[in-house]
Amino acid sequence: MTATELGQALRRWRDRVSPDTAGLPAGGQRRAAGLRREELALLAGISVDYVTRLEQGRAANPSGQVVEALGRALRLSGDERAYLFRLAGLVPQGPEMVPAYIPPSVQRMLDRLVDTPVGVSDAALTLLLANPMYAALMGDQSGLRGLERNGLWRNFLGGPTRVRHTPQERRAMEAGMVAELRATAARYPADRQLRRLIAELRGGSERFAELWDAGVVGRLEASRKTIEHPQVGLLTLDCDLLRVEGSDLHILVYSAEPGTEAAEKLRLISVLGTQSLVE
């Protein structure tokens, strides 16, 4: 397999994905119905220059993380994803690794939830995909890389988030996240990236080490979350955690009861998007 074959495959798959299917505006003059390079780069979280070099055969060894992100952005089937990994000279993740694949059926469901904040994470709580409403509500996380995209890392080692917890809510959330990670580690004992995450959390957070060493078990449950948005202020939303058992994915969905102040604020956030009102 050559880099030219990789580039041809990427261009072919890019041409068949329409912007509206990917949740992007389709305005302006377009030479083809498919995604532009800059749109694929945006969806995959990589640079336009790197997409260009891959398609032109000037970059031949993308990482597994990049390949996985390209596969999600291009809505590849399981067989197509495996083919993309082989073109890149990589072996697709096996059953002993935490899956990062979003099946097309799940992707189609997410595409229909355009007015609802939705984030998709793997079994280790690493964010794989966030729709524009999620980015508008929680802040644009497309620039996060590596462990920064992991929910446990952000909560135990990262900076502040827009979620506001009472002390009791935070303790319950932390225990639930650690219990979820413990169950995931038991299912995927050979995953080196997962072991690295656990080691970094234990070394950097006394609270995580305390919970991990205590052997907390259970799972992360649905809850109500209060979010402080920089433009609309505080709003409390239902936060439902949906599990896709076959793919071991976690889908986080935020919603508000119709007719409430929170629902009106959520509607306003959908209009604002990720723009800032500060000149």
Image (tube, rainbow, N blue to C red):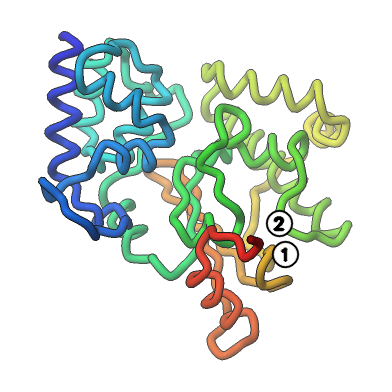
Provide residue 52's location: percent of width, then percent of height.
27, 25
> Residue lying farthest bottom?
259
Q: Are marks 2 and 1 in contact (CB under 8 Å)?
A: yes
In this view of the protein, which residue sits in the foreground, 234 or 81? 234
Q: Amino acid at mark 2?
A: Arg
Mark 1 sits on what residue? 228
In this view of the protein, which residue sits in the foreground, 90 or 39? 39
Q: Amino acid at mark 1?
A: Glu
Residue 98 appears left or right of 189: left
Image quarter in which the C terminus is found: bottom right
- Give the Cα separation between the discs numbered 2 and 1: 5 Å
Classify residue 235 by image quadrant.
bottom right
| Residue 249 position (above or below residue 201) | below
Provide residue 264's location: percent of width, then percent of height.
57, 83
Mark 2 sits on what residue? 162
Mark 2 secondary-structure assignment? loop
Mark 2 neighbour class, 10 Å CA radius: few under 14, some 14 to 19, many 20 or more: some
Counting residues from the start of the chain, the first of labels 2 and 1 encountered is 2
